[in-house]
Image: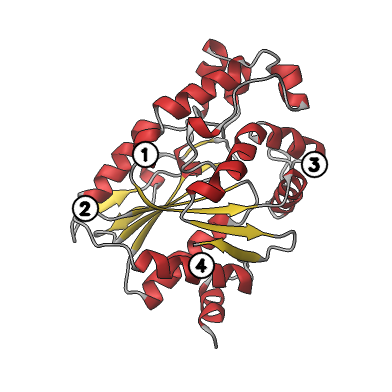
Amino acid sequence: MSKAEALLAALPEGAEANLSAAEAALLIAERIAQLPREIIPPVVGINGAQGSGKSTIAKLVVEALERYHDLRPALLSLDNFYLGRPPRYLLEKEVHPLCVTRGVPGTHDVPLMVQTFNALDCAGARSRTPLPAFDKLSDDRMARELWPMFDGRPGVILFEGWCVGLEAEDVPDWAGPINALEREMDPTGEWFQWSLATLRDDYRAIWRRLELLVSIEMPDLETVIQSRLKQEQDLPESAEHPRMDREAITRFVQHYERFTRALWASMPERADMLFRRDRDFGYSLVKG
């Protein structure tokens, strides 16, 4: 059995991954293992648009680091730092109606990110560090007593999220709406400017912690929609939480489109490792 096959076999039953993703994870783990061992654990960012497979690859990287490099990582997801429903409803009222939809810069709890990173930095062998958790089905943060705990001191911190490492300077200036959502809901760019300002003012302190930045590029927005649709079809459906159809997903993806396009344009130069994902979930290393 190859190393990539062993990684796939170690995933929980039902986890969606393929040999190409496992091979990409092995390359990332190798690069992480070469990072200098500092006083505080190095932070590695992994970004990519919705449906790019970054969360699955991050889990495979965790397994590869533990199995082949004797490194014990803490895995954090940007999604678990979403603001809960009450704070977003307040933003909806005070800033803009689109603020109620989680995802864009400004809808994350950055102080909680800083607090969590600081706690992991200072963790000792007997420490138990709570890691925030968000329930997407209820669209709210889970109760603190339900958060998972990281035991001990991490050898590295993996931080995966769609816009991790994106700088405000990477995003082109407003020149009018670029999709139907913006034409309907943000024709003058008020919501966009608010989100861009939070990316510039609040997130930079987090991005400065990154010792290594990994990016996953996708062919186009249609691939993002198709991938997100597949994810939606795999979710449990209930009367309370019906699955989104293609129209709903297209509208959802449009919330991120402006930033997603900026990510694709800037990462070939700024990322330390760049993978290109094809429509069949094949990953090719094009930088790093």
Q: Residue furthest front?
A: 269
Mark 4 Cα-neighbour bin, 10 Å: few <14, some 14–19, many ≥20: many
Q: CA gap, disc 2 to disc 4?
A: 26 Å
| Disc number lying in front (2 or 1) | 1
Please tell me which of labels 1 and 4 falls first in the chain.
4
Label 3 belongs to which residue?
245
Give the residue type that dot 1 points to.
Ile
Please tell me which of labels 2 and 4 falls first in the chain.
4
Give the residue type that dot 3 points to.
Asp
Mark 4 residue element: helix
Q: CA gap, disc 2 to disc 1?
A: 18 Å
Q: CA gap, disc 1 to disc 3?
A: 34 Å
Give the residue type that dot 4 points to.
Ala
Q: Residue at x 69, y 37 (%)?
A: 253
Give the residue type that dot 2 points to.
Ala
Q: Residue at x 62, y 46 (%)?
A: 49
Query: Residue 6: x percent and y percent?
Result: 52, 80
Query: Residue 150: x percent and y percent?
Result: 32, 56
Q: Which mark is residue 206?
A: 1
Mark 1 residue element: helix
Query: Residue 244: x percent and y percent?
Result: 75, 41
Q: Residue at x 75, y 28 (%)?
A: 179
Please tell me which of labels 1 and 3 falls first in the chain.
1
Please tell me which of labels 2 and 3 falls first in the chain.
2
Label 4 belongs to which residue?
25
| Disc number lying in front (1 or 3) | 1
Marks 3 and 2: in contact by CB < 8 Å?
Answer: no
Q: CA gap, disc 4 to disc 3?
A: 31 Å
Along the line of sight, the residue nearer the viewer: 285 or 6: 285
Label 2 belongs to which residue?
123
Mark 3 residue element: loop
The answer to whether residue 247 is seen in the rendering is yes
